[in-house]
Image (tube, grey):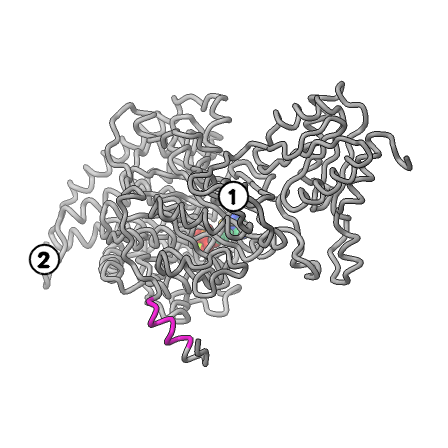
Amino acid sequence: MEAPAVASPYSKDLLLTMYRKMYLIRRFEERAGQQYTLGKIAGFCHLYIGQEAVAVGPIEAMRKDDYMLSAYRDHGQPLARGSDAGMVMAELFGRGTGYSKGKGGSMHIFDIEHQFYGGYGIVGGQIPLAAGMAFASRYRNEDRVTVCYFGDAAANQGALHETFNMASKWKLPVIYICENNRYGMGTAISRTSAVPEIYKRAAAYDMRGEPVDGMDVLKMYEAVKDAAAWCRAGKGPVLLEANTYRFRGHSMADPATYRSKQEVEEERKGDPIPKLRDYALKNGLGADADFERIEEEVKAQVDAAVKFADESPEPSLEELWRDTIVEPGEPDVRPRERVLGVKVENWPSYPSGQELKVTWDLEPRAQAEAADKKAGLTN
Amino acid sequence: MPELMYREALNQALAEEMERDANVFLIGEEVGRYNGAFKVSQGLLDKFGSARIIDAPISELGFGGMSVGAAMVGLRPVVEMMTWNFAILAMDQIVNNAAKLRHMSGGQLRCPIVFRGPGGAGGRLSSQHSQSLEANYAHFPGLKVIAPATPADAKGMLKSAIRDENPVIMFEGERLYALKGEVPEGEHVVPLGKADVKREGTDVTVITWSRMYYFCMQAAEELAKEGISVEVLDLRTLRPLDEEAILASVRKTNRAVIVEEGWALAGIGASVVDIIQSKAFDELDAPVERVTGLDVNMSYAANLENATQPDAPKIIAAVKKVLYRQGA
Ligand SMILES: Cc1ncc(C[n+]2csc(CCOP(=O)(O)OP(=O)(O)O)c2C)c(N)n1
Ligand SMILES: [Mg+2]
């Protein structure tokens, strides 16, 4: 093979890790789709196929303790953050061994051990939550960043505009990644948006906003690495518009007849998974055998996940009465501890109200008084 | 015991809890430099600084949801809604997120947050500004809903709400803020979920909460002059309802009147009637009566506004009805 002109800045290890994670999502989603048609999964099931790079690039660029949350198209991110594939699949199956004991299903994956703060089913509803998590980090003087995903159609929710205004005004360390797959269900984003380039909306809030090629995992990686450094430096929020495409329908119930075959065929040529493989091969950072090995391992992992889900029991009926109200002294549930009996050490803990010292001056008095003066107020 | 206004009692609770726990912060419109639309947060910005007393933009959904997010990762936000009418814009975050986080996460997350502000009629404010919306929130599993009537309860219940591990919805009242009452100093904590017999009686139980409590007490005094002994049960917490206290009182008096500022259909009173009829039917000597706001939108005109709301004469009439002493 020809030697590349410029050496790649990436390690083989990083590229293979990204490949493994993207392939895991792809394989998991293919099997989930299949299990849905078999009737093992019900309700709404939104697959991530085609969008894998948008999850995996950022996750490799983040710290393990950075927070993340997403909408209902939410199988990909937790898998890439390290969630147990069997327990995610069990949640899709509605089994007691799922991350949320089968109470949440496909749209509500939560894995706090891996800092994945949930999938949310109300379009745009997670956007303010992310700002609040970033607010808490700022309040406690931590340099943690929050990464929040939402769809192109969610950009038209008032929640986004209200939140961007506050996040920018208070310089909150939050990265918003708009997964622009060009459709909200069956409606092309250009049909419902006066400004279909979502990243431009950041300008209205004096906030950094950029488009990114969401079909290129390395571009996503670079964009989030840079944005995270920006956030940690206290410069405020960032909006990244990841231009991507879902290869399947909106959910398993959607045959996606509103798109032409041609369009889908064209987009499939930009598949992020072979793209990364080609890049690695071209740069001598992996051989065919590496990728074949990864694929075999992932296939076995996902087979085992399906088997685990299928063999798991439904939640017990007593579960109906749990997890609505927190009773005094009741601890939080650590899913892998509950299901697999392993010790989960990695659980968020924060200073108590007596230990915590809040040093942040969100609106310095002089600044507030200057603004009042400018407005013509004197007292 | 010192006498405090309702708003001062709330201010004391906030200051004490913020002193006690640096994770507690207050956010809302005008809570900082303006000292609160109803002066509940008077002086707190100077005491706690601008990261803990936060002047929010007029974005109820935005700062409501942002606070839910902060609660998910260990802070304890108190969100002041200028009034509950405006909080309707935040209902998505309260109902779809705060109330469901524990459930959706299968017990991984908790959401210790207080949403508080005035509910009910403020006086001559017409239909958009005069609603009693507690029944709406009481409907949702995953929330607690409180509506204290007295300054002492306001202080003690706000302290409990801030310490609670769940989302708590607190209804205060524009017409309650200036009312005075004795308030214990320092550590005065009133448990959530417990009703309070504010006046003992033997002939009839009048069940109420929030501002209607004062009309009920007035009615009870009037009726006492006629030899009618009224027990006034202040529910204080609307979710969960204190079934035990409701049933204990009704079993004693065998008659009940429920007084509610809000509308009758799907009101809290309807649920109280249900508890009574299903668990104490045999002990009733008369059908339960309800006195509620009229099933219309609130008007600005003074006479129309007054006629829309419950008052002492309406309560007296209802009590006499359950005693079969109409026209007596
Ligand atoms: C507030 C709200 N309105 C409508 C829906 C129904 N709905 C679910 S997904 C969706 C489209 C969202 O599209 P987008 O934000 O682009 O995300 P994508 O599905 O493409 O990932 C709609 C309308 C909803 N869940 N929430
Ligand atoms: Mg979309």
Q: Secondary structure at mark 1?
A: loop
Q: Residues within 10 Å of mark 1 (few under 14, many from 20)?
A: many
Disc 2 and disc 1 in contact, CB within 8 angstroms: no
Report x, y in % for residue A97.
38, 26
**Which residue does the numbered mark 2 point to in the structure image?**
A2
Q: How many marks?
A: 2
Q: Chain of mark 2?
A: A
Q: Is residue A371 found inside the magenta-colored segment of the image? A: yes
Three-letter amino acid code at disc 2?
Glu
Where A244 falls versus A306 (above or below)? below
**Range of the magenta residues?**
A364-372
Where A371 falls versus B218 (above or below)? below
Determine the image quadrant of residue B105: top left
Report x, y in % for residue B24.
38, 48
- Residue visible at 66% across and 24% down in the picture: B247
- Residue visible at 42% across and 26% down in the picture: A96
The residue nearer to you, when weighing A90 against A167, is: A167
**Which residue does the numbered mark 1 point to in the structure image?**
B183
The residue nearer to you, when weighing A361 against A204, is: A361
Q: Chain of mark 1?
A: B
- Left or right: where A176 falls relative to B141: left
Three-letter amino acid code at disc 1?
Val
